[in-house]
Image (cartoon, grey):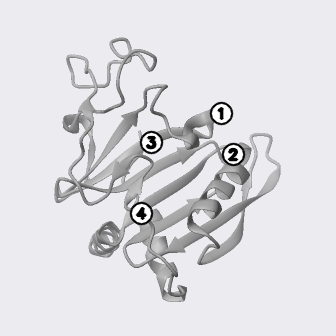
Amino acid sequence: MLALSAAGISAAAQASHRARSPTSAPSLQILGFALEQPPTLITCPTTRDGRFDNRAWSPTLDSTCMESPTRADTSADGRAKTLPVHFSRSEEPALAAGMHARGFALLILDGTVQGVLVSTSGLDSQKAIYAMLKKKYGIPTSIAKTHGQTGAGKSTEGISASWVFADVRVSFEGIEATADEGKLSITTIGAVDYTTTAASVSK
């Protein structure tokens, strides 16, 4: 399950200090989800204990759904929840094709969608995902090289990039400490401010 990551999202906020003024603001329609609006997905079927029931849901027969809020990762103050999403084959975004993404989740803050969080397959998909993001958002506000290790212990190079706009922050880590994992977050400025404040309070 994708968890709330104040550190990951607030990294985009730090990048905003180096941001240039974007020529145009990105759409608040992200991977089929409308940011700053209540979620409209149906709730996935659950087991008796409220967990996602993958035996009762089929990606080829059923509609895209989000997991039950009762089992969501929830912030200490109860305002923010991370709800995993399961796409039907007919509705999955291009990012999910070819196993580029391993998991999707919605960041819900005060009842509205304030971000989309994606767990990626790391080194295998970072170039393809970065190309998608660059095509959609243009030249990144900041970009840097990172380093991680493959399963065989070999050092490898990753892409760390962010796009900073007035209302939206996009943060992409092609690989993390291990090269078979990466992450992408597309969040509103409201979510960035919330997670940055939550991180500082918890210290």
Which residue in the structure is indicated by mark 1? Answer: 98
Task: Tell which tag, 4 or 3, sits nearer the viewer.
Answer: 4
Q: Is residue 140 left or right of residue 16?
A: right
Against 8, is 67 above or below?
above
Task: Say which label, 2 or 1, has the lower sequence index.
Answer: 1
Mark 2–mark 3 Cα distance, whole angstroms, equals 15 Å
Which residue in the structure is indicated by mark 3? Answer: 104
Mark 2–mark 1 Cα distance, whole angstroms, equals 9 Å
Task: Tell which tag, 3 or 1, sits nearer the viewer.
Answer: 1
Disc 4 is placed on an element classified as loop
Which residue in the structure is indicated by mark 2? Answer: 125
Decide which of 60, 45 is in the foreground and name it.
60
- Find out whether the residues at labels 2 and 1 contact each other: C-beta distance under 8 Å: yes
From the top left corner, tell me how far across and down residue 116 is, in percent. 40, 52
Decide which of 185, 5 is in the foreground and name it.
185
**Amino acid tagged 1:** Gly
From the top left corner, tell me how far across and down residue 15 is, in percent. 52, 79
Disc 1 is placed on an element classified as helix
Q: Name, please, the residue furthest toward the top.
A: 55
Crowdedness near tag 3: few (<14), some (14–19) or many (≥20) residues, C-alpha within 10 Å: many
**Amino acid tagged 4:** Ser
